[in-house]
Amino acid sequence: MNSSQRNDEGFTGLEAAIVLIAFVVVAAVFSYVVLGAGFFTTQKAQETVHTGVQQTTSAVEPSGPVSVQALDSSSINTISFYLQLAAGGTGVDMSKVTYTVSTPKRVTTFTNQQVNYTWVKQNTPIDAGQNVSAGLLNSREMVLVTINPAFSSAEMTNNDRFIVEVKPPIGAALPIARSIPAGMVAGTWYEVY
């Protein structure tokens, strides 16, 4: 063998080791990126589930009858109904609840300042701030909501179907659909269905 010839056989093992290490590093970086993306997706899914649970558990529900007071024989003056928390719900800030009263001829939204609250059932001790237009509705409490829609007899009259949509700040809206009685006497209260 000629001494001027190079023997390259010794370098093939070192080159293979370098290539193997490069593949391992690239695979480690790729797996880190994939795991990071998976953890991010899992966290977002968990946040979505928690938000959905919070929105469904904070809803209010009607308790008892819905009543209207007749202004005259064909129109109403007042709508009133009781609200309480749905089972397992968390407190609802009544100062942030809005109400939409709609008929086939008119839709009007009312804020908490345009309705009256009468706290008919309160926890002991009574929460500060529960008054005619605000307060925190907690479990085992009930509030009477009174709305004066001021719709004309052309907009809401006998046998018309009306919907009161209660919209809490968190949670699904609660629609309450009822019909105006066929015959009424001014100043009289009627339970509606």
Image: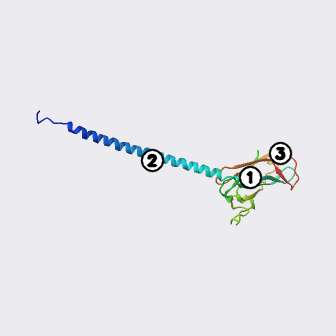
Q: Amino acid at mark 2?
A: Gly
Contact between marks 3 and 2 (CB within 8 A): the answer is: no
Task: Please provide percent x and percent y for residue 64.
Answer: 78, 53
Task: Please provide percent x and percent y for residue 162.
Answer: 77, 47
Task: Please provide percent x and percent y for residue 42.
Answer: 51, 47
Between 103 and 130, the one nearer to me in the picture: 130
Count neighbours of disc 2 (C-alpha within 10 A) and say few if under 14, some if 14 to 19, many if 20 or more. Answer: few
Mark number for residue 159?
3
Count neighbours of disc 3 (C-alpha within 10 A) and say few if under 14, some if 14 to 19, many if 20 or more. Answer: few
Q: How is the image coloured?
A: rainbow
Between 38 and 157, the one nearer to me in the picture: 38
**Disc 3 or 2, which lies upstream in sequence?**
2
Quarter of the image for residue 28 reads top left
Between 95 and 65, the one nearer to me in the picture: 65
**Left or right placement of residue 8 versus residue 98 in this view:** left
**Disc 1 or 3, which lies upstream in sequence?**
1
Q: Amino acid at mark 1?
A: Pro
Question: What is the distance, in whole Å, between disc 3 and disc 2 at their CAs?
Answer: 61 Å
Q: Amino acid at mark 3?
A: Asn
Residue under label 1, please give it.
62
Residue under label 2, please give it.
36
Between 49 and 1, the one nearer to me in the picture: 1
